Image (spheres, coloured by chain):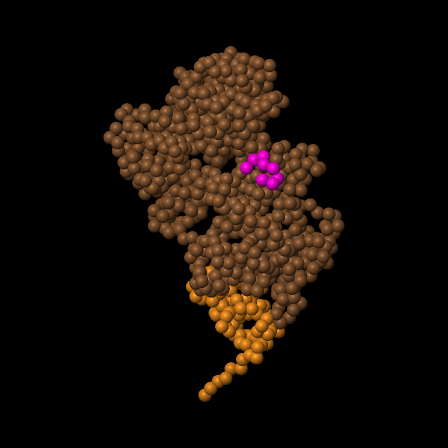
Chain colours: A orange, B brown
Amino acid sequence: MTTSIERTWTAVCAAGAVPEWSGVAALLDDGVQVAIFRLPGGRWHALSNLDPISGAAVLSRGIVGDAGGVPVVASPVYKERFDLRTGECLDAEGVSVAAYAVRVTGGVVEVEASP
Amino acid sequence: MRKLVVAGHGMVAHRLVEAVRAEDKTGEWEVVVLAEEARPAYDRVALTSYVDTWDPASLALEGADYADDPLVDLRLGDAVASVDRERKVVVTEAGYEQPYDALVLATGSRPFVPPVPGHDLPGCFVYRTIEDLDAIREAAQRPGRGRRSAVVIGGGLLGLEAAKALRDMGLSPHVVEMAPRLMPLQVDEGGGGLLRRLITELDVTVHTGTSTDAIEPDGSRYIAKLGNGTELDVDLVVFSAGIRPRDDLARSSGLEVGARGGILVDDTCRTSDPAVYAIGECAAVDGKVYGIVAPGYAMAEIVAARLTGGEGTFPEPDMSTKLKLMGVDVASFGDAHAATEGALEVAFNDAVAGTYKKLVISDDSKTLLGGVLVGDASEFNTLRAMVGRPLPAGPGAILAPAGGGAAVGVDALPDEAQICSCNAVSKGAITHAITDQGCDSVAKIKGCTRAGTACGSCVPLLGKLLTACGVEQSKALCEHFSQSRAELFQILQATRISTFSEMIDRYGSGTGCAICKPAIASILATLGNGHILAGEQATLQDTNDKFLANLQRNGTYSVVPRIPGGEVTPEKLMVIAQVAMDFGLYTKITGGQRIDLFGATVDQLPLIWRRLVDAGFESGHAYGKSLRTVKSCVGSTWCRYGVQDSVGLAIELELRYRGLRSPHKLKSAVSGCARECAEARSKDFGIIATDKGWNLYVGGNGGATPRHADLLVSEVDTETLIRTIDRFLMFYVRTADRLQRTAPWVEEMEGGLDHLRAVIVDDKLGICEDLDAAMVKHVGDYADEWRGVLEDPEKLAKFSSFVNAPGTPDPTISFRTERDQKVPVLLGIPEVKQ
């Protein structure tokens, strides 16, 4: 028997609105803020926009790069790095943020409403 | 509670009071200091630098007025006149009686004036106090014909200091020394010969091996008649022929004095009366008087320990000295004069290079006993630490110039050897910090051991110790670039690569990070690659540069319009006020004489700046690693004391250097007179007006490690001043490390301030033309960054909180009211385990 889980996607913006190596913030219906990041080669990642260390909703404004090959965003407040794939913080043990699924269909960026 | 009375308030007395107050945990002692001078203790060792500013505050010792200490009563201008040891009471000049339980005599010394005829004429001075220098200055400024001249009687350390001060005041100095050479206590014949040559080249006329027989008035001038028949026609005379301990109180109260003067004390600094101590230059420890400050400090510490239940005895002091006289290095250490029986001397005299080095070694030629260095004292720290220890190589090899022989390595030092003499840190303590406490940089060693944090002369040795311990001091900017920031600057300049992606493809690895991206963005901006938010550059910037505003803790930003020099019209103030009211911004005056508007969301930033730019404001770069402000006092336009237009210069400088991207923020200030109201010496580059021009100070900062800026050039005209600052800034921007401010940059530079001066004033490296051209380009290329955003819809579009809901404010941001203004309420901070 196969169980299919219905996934709900929220359209956020045109793909062209997000330059490579940068992030944008999106406000979802339930007030959740998601930070969406674009890397070259059509790779997209989405994390909660709320930086758990400072409490400010700013992760989308961090610098995107890598740490030993792991794609990361560095919080603009105190510079802790978060793994773009999992939301795990590399600089504070046990700290992580929610990671969301993200896809681009027909030139439109969509995020999954719940992580 | 017991009374401690201190007679005198010089540097040593101040150290005593500090040490007693630090050790006396229970507040057992109430301290009364009776000082002769009308000002608290000041840095007499640095007296000659008073000529740079003529500001007594520049010599102030921190905390020497004990303003916040109820247990210290400092009474200025009323010296102790007599001591009644029977009743344990001192009587002051004013007739006041002060009982004591313990009395410390710290009356210092007086300059020795040889009793030559005419020594008390009005044009004769001594060189010991601020008042002495003021009096010399007044005499030097009296109108007269031609170049003024002066004679200093005494060619020791202090005499040469006096000659330097006189030269800095614009006089031609002569120095007369009875001994056959200058600085006879510190250097030997060979070193003295070279020293004489080097000092003569600096416009000082030296007469050695002759007495001064008489001073005779000649109209408004004086004739100094020397024993060798020479007659010197001078405007004034300064006696600097040694010091004599001030032991009068001991003599009048029946305390024992040394055979050659000085209050006789034992090795705990106690006099023949157990309730009375003597410290500093008035004391004769086992009959011997010490005329430098370090042994005095040691005495102060011992007495403080004894008074507070501790122990300690005066150790045989290290009389090693290292100093720079008019730019000439002079150092001596250990048994410099080969007084030890059978001692051997090995000297190396390089007349071409202008260096003289001598080592004194034991008769079996195995142990270093002492030495003399003139012209180049860079090996002083290493050699001094080796005194009394086996030589690691033959003395000839050690003396040979670098490259020619096996110079002394830091490896050769034993663990007990003191590397930092200011804070008494041994090599062992430093290697322990490196190997067991994980210090892998000079900065971490400083933090861990305090070594290198005072005078900084041992900093190069700290680097060598790191290398010796196998710690490779990586210059790599980050994991993506193995090059240092200075190397990356050179690459970008030479290759004209204009994007980060090309740079990391060709010279780095990986995809970059929050360290290398802003660093390279900054270099690209310095080199003039258009607007900092153009194209890919926008993705490299830290959030402050990306939004051209300062991120605050709740995710909002603050806005600082430029107010050059702090000068602003009422009309412009009203614009700022109106903008703040319309957008509901918290308003605060900054330390840099401008106005900071807090609480703006990213959506509001362009709306705010539209209004500000329309009113004639431009970006203040409070967000950037770049020039912040050039602060100023009101200057000669309004101030009764101002001697130059400090506001005008501050505005000119601020407009010249605005927007210059640099390794760290840059702050500056201009003061219109020596009162220094603009606090210029706490800045990266600070300018203080004199009646003849401008003094430029560099390498200062406030912050966690405050540092006063050092004098780079003095009394220059505006054109020279600006050219020197241009070069200073460009040289800094090109060669400093990421986030390294100018203070550590100068401190860690090999050769320090002298090297910096050689590069940007004397053009030793031949790069000044290039530095000048770079600054001309910067000034020409400048454009207001905020205007650039407002004129470009693509850049404007980035100023939105939410890509799918432009104009919707961030729901996590909220405010409450405090003192009639709004302040952030922090919401949604989840529990964070750290």
Q: Does residue B250 show up?
A: yes
Q: Is residue B642 left or right of residue B319?
A: right
Give the x, y percent position of residue A6. Answer: 53, 82
Give the x, y percent position of residue B818. Answer: 67, 53
In the rendered view, would you say B753 is above or below B16?
below
In the rendered view, would you say B635 is above or below A93?
above
Number of numbered discs overlaid on the protein picture: 0
Give the x, y percent position of residue B753. Answer: 49, 40
Range of residues picked out in magenta: B713-720
For the residue pair A29 and B435, the one nearer the viewer reads as: B435
The residue at 58%/49% (across/down) is B776
Q: Does residue B114 show up?
A: no
The residue at 30%/25% (across/down) is B340
Choose top left, top right, bottom left or bottom right for residue B323: top left
Is B274 magenta? The answer is no
For the residue pair B134 and B330, the one nearer the viewer reads as: B330
Give the x, y percent position of residue B212. Answer: 47, 15
Residue most extreme to the top: B117
The residue at 56%/68% (across/down) is A19
Q: Is residue A38 left or right of residue B317?
A: right
The residue at 48%/61% (across/down) is B503
